[in-house]
Amino acid sequence: MYHFDVESAINDCCRWIQHWFAENGDGCPAVLGISGGKDSSVCAALLCRALGVHRVVGVMMPNNVQPDIADAKQLCSHLGIVNYTVNIGACANALTEEINAQLPMSRQATVNLPPRLRMATVYAVSQSINGRVANTCNLSEDWVGYSTRWGDSVGDFAPLAQFTVTEVKAMGRALGLPENLVEKPPSDGLTGKTDEDNLGFTYKELDAYLREGIEPSPEIKERIDRKHKANLFKLSMMPSFPFSPKE
């Protein structure tokens, strides 16, 4: 039976973070978007343990009004990290209006615009302080493509990318995060639905399938496998034509 050694995972991940920064930005701060959800909360806590609170910078990015922004503020206060609030609402509204004046934006394009603007914002803050951007996605989300390409799917390094949702929650508790942040229903913050509503299955089912090979119902298994195959490109480097000059 699979056993997740949470303390070992935390210690190993922190050492990996320290090594990555020693090689790719010695002394630089880590910068990440803070939503108040478990992933950004756990990632921020790991960074604080690995690098020290003084080297972690959080960026809160409401899209006009964010009903749950108190959770993001709670996390920043709990960890004691430097943080900035940049409201992307005016930018998102203006860009949407400009595009719609030329052609109707699709629903998916409208949904994905804010996370792409958020990532541009995180990089602008990071570059302004010579930082390195942390990707906060986890294995469960990445497996089924539950991220926005060139939005929350990117970053300079990814501490949580090999941990499932179940494992991330365990790490959050071991790191002493407030329970309401660890157990906050996962949501993209865009559609008004939880992740599981949008996916059509639970993370518990997905994680059991990934880690223990416990197959869910045939319908859900087919959905997971289909989503995984369809979204593999999100995790790959951009392909380029393999041109070779002829002699």
Image (tube, grey):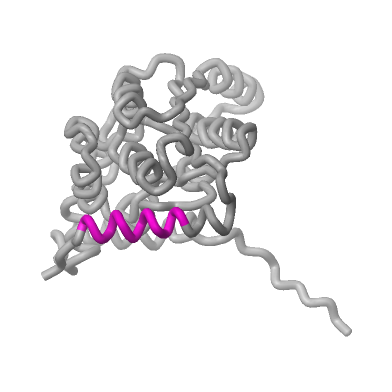
Magenta-drawn stretch contains 148: no
| Percent x, y of residue 170 | 19, 49
**Main structural element of the magenta stretch: helix, strand or loop?**
helix
Residue 89, compared with residue 192, is above or below; it is above
| Percent x, y of residue 82 | 45, 27
| Percent x, y of residue 15 | 39, 58
Q: To which quarter of the image does residue 77 belong?
A: top left
Image quarter where the N terminus lies is bottom left
Residue displayed at 41% across by 41% down: 52
Left or right? Give the position of 4 relative to 164: left
Residue 2, compared with residue 144, is above or below; it is below
Residue extending farthest left: 1
Residue displayed at 41% across by 30% down: 81
Left or right? Give the position of 178 relative to 125: left
Q: From the viewer's side, name the closer residue of 212 and 98.
A: 212
Image quarter where the C terminus lies is bottom right
Q: What stretch is highlighted in magenta?
A: 6-18
